[in-house]
Image (cartoon, helix red, strand yellow):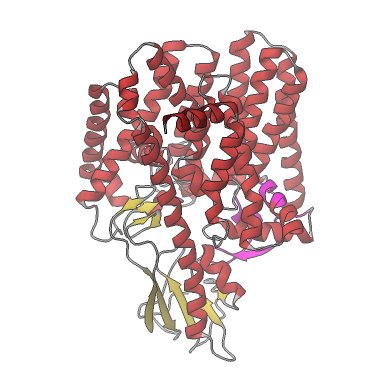
């Protein structure tokens, strides 16, 4: 048995890329048939538009909020992921399996790119890349057809090429990195943050300007061209529109867009609001990068781990007693229970451990590499907490490669200082890795079950309520909207309702943008996740938006997916 494990270890050391490719397929392969859910339909509808009119990706209207709205108003991401999906669908088709198979390639590229990048920073690049893969943030995002993993793939490869170009004084690599930065920014606007991040790294390496700066002109010119194109097509700068949307929608935002907040009728932001947003971001950082939490006892002294837990507990009590966090989740069933409070404190402590990794690495090294990694993590955290339209797992995801590298560097330092001894490894260092991978798989499975429940809810509404000569109306979005529209349902335009008396309106309770009438005709439920969920406003899980809950996922009793059915009748109780 010992010989077998030694041979397996030697083979893995000799074939790290094969190990990573196999791990990606094993981790994501079981979810290739996952139904489309959450914001997946937005990207699919964009891809279908591109398939028909490739020069006009957002040139159609959609009911996603209250009324029929141009897609360029609804979609707050650039269209490159839609172009990729359209290209893939042209070859493989539009089925769930076909598109998930196509998006398996960006996931593989992101992990292999993390490995390539980690080779410049640590002696354990395989461990660093696996630490990216086996996190809830990556695996859940990897089972979608949204833009996040595709952007991450461009991001890590751009960073790797930029570092190699700076080390080798190779402008071809720097130019290639510039092209990849542009592609990242055209996939998700957050990708443009690579421009100042890698620019600062270049300055710290060279301490003077040079031809290397020209590599950053490529994404700047590309974004200027994109700005001109969107203005020509839609008479608006879509990058600015996305920033204004974030300022209006973020309940804790208090930054540059105070004027827009006032115009939208939002109240002033208090210090408590900002503290609540930061605390929310801590729980999402710890939960979405859970492996860093499980490894903390091996990477920090016991009193340091205790300080993380103590600080998280004190902050949680202050926010619960003071009110901003508790008030934001007042619609949760039975409020915040002790089991949820324990989970909040646990993952918030984990978030502190992640931020401490970045701060400690910079404090000890204070070089260009540590500056890049620490600003990568801390910058993503600040954006997630205070500048994005909501705290969510998708916004935490970009820091995963940097955190994986920091974990490997921390382990390498402690092993070199003899603080990690072989006896400690024998006593169970595999345990946190197994726990992290198992948790990531369970959260991803829960997300899969939720997507299946959304599709089944649409089918059950159609089976129960379809009547000849009548339109089947609904509120709600995400996968429920996607599949019910395929079955002939029609989203209710609340500003211009065409629904007639006697027609049926279906409303899924665990959904967004709802305004149901007062008295339902009847209701039914569909079984969804039972003891772990990543998106349910009644138990406080909000992986895709913290407006649904203060945690990216929650352990505990999860109610089924309830769908209310109304027979429409005009009058005081009607709420279109």
Q: What is the magenta range? A: 56-84
- Image-quadrant location for residue 166: top right
- Seen in the picture, residue 390 relative to 30 is either above or below; the reply is above
The picture places residue 111, in percent across and down from the top left corner, at 58, 36
Residue 92 visible within the image: yes
Q: Nearer the viewer, residue 226 or 176?
A: 176
- Image x and y of residue 444, in percent: 45, 51
Q: Nearer the viewer, residue 12 or 523?
A: 12
Q: Quadrant of residue 121?
A: top right
Q: Nearer the viewer, residue 262 or 343?
A: 343
Depth check: give the residue in front, 449 or 534.
Answer: 449
As for residue 60 lying within the magenta part, the answer is yes
| Residue 96 magenta | no
Kindly identify the residue that appears in the image at 44 percent across and 18 percent down: 412
Where does residue 259 sit, x and y in percent of width and height? Answer: 50, 42
For the point 66% across and 51% down, the residue is 102
Q: Residue at x 45, y 28 (%)?
A: 378
Left or right: residue 375 compared with residue 228? left
| Residue 170 x %, y % | 75, 16
């Amino acid at each position: 048995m010992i010989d077998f494990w030694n041979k397996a270890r030697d083979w893995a050391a000799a074939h790290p890329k094969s190990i990573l490719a196999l791990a990606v397929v094993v981790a994501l392969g079981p979810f290739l048939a996952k139904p489309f859910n959450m914001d997946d339909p937005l990207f699919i509808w964009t891809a279908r538009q591109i398939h028909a009119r490739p020069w006009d990706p957002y040139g159609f209207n959609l009911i996603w909020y209250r009324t029929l709205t141009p897609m360029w108003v609804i979609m707050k991401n650039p269209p490159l992921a839609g172009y990729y999906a359209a290209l893939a669908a042209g070859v493989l088709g539009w089925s769930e399996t076909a598109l998930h198979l196509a998006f398996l390639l960006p996931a593989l590229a992101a992990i292999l790119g993390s490995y390539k990048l980690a080779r410049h920073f640590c002696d354990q690049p395989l461990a660093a890349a696996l630490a990216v893969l086996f996190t809830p943030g990556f695996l859940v995002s990897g089972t979608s057809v949204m833009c996040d993993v595709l952007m991450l793939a461009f991001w890590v490869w751009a960073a790797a090429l930029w570092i190699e170009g700076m080390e080798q004084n190779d402008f071809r690599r720097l130019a290639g990195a510039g092209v990849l930065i542009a592609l990242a920014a055209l996939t998700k606007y957050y990708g443009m943050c690579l421009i100042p991040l890698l620019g600062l790294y270049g300055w710290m390496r060279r301490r003077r300007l040079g031809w290397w700066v020209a590599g950053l002109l490529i994404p700047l010119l590309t974004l200027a061209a994109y700005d001109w194109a969107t203005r020509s097509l839609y008479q608006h700068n879509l990058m600015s529109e996305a920033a204004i949307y974030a300022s209006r929608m973020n309940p804790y935002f208090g930054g540059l867009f105070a004027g827009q907040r006032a115009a939208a009728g939002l109240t002033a932001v208090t210090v408590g609001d900002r503290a609540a947003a930061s605390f929310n971001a801590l729980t999402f950082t710890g939960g979405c990068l859970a492996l860093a939490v499980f490894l903390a006892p091996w990477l920090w002294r016991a009193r340091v781990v205790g300080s993380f837990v103590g600080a998280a507990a004190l902050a949680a009590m202050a926010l619960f007693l003071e009110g901003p966090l508790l008030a934001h989740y007042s619609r949760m069933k039975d409020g915040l229970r002790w089991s949820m409070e324990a989970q909040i404190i646990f993952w918030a402590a984990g978030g502190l451990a992640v931020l401490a990794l970045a701060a400690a690495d910079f404090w000890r090294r204070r070089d260009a590499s540590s500056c890049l990694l620490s600003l990568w993590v801390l910058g993503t955290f600040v954006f997630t907490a205070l500048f994005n339209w909501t705290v969510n797992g998708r916004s935490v995801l970009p820091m995963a490669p940097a955190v994986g590298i920091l974990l490997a560097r921390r382990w390498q330092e402690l092993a070199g200082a003899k603080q990690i001894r072989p006896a400690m490894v024998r006593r169970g260092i595999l345990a946190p890795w197994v726990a992290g991978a198992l948790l990531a798989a369970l959260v991803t499975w829960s997300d899969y079950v939720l997507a299946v429940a959304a599709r089944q809810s649409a089918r059950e509404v159609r089976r129960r309520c379809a009547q000849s000569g009548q339109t089947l109306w609904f509120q709600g979005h995400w996968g429920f909207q996607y599949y019910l529209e395929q079955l002939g349902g029609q989203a209710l335009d609340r500003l211009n309702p065409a629904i007639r008396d006697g027609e049926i309106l279906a409303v899924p309770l665990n959904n967004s943008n709802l305004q149901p009438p007062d008295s339902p005709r009847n209701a039914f439920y569909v079984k969804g996740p039972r003891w772990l969920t990543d998106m349910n406003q009644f138990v406080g899980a909000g992986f895709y938006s913290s407006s649904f809950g203060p945690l990216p996922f929650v352990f505990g009793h999860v109610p089924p997916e309830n769908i209310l059915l109304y027979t429409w009748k005009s009058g005081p109780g009607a709420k279109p």
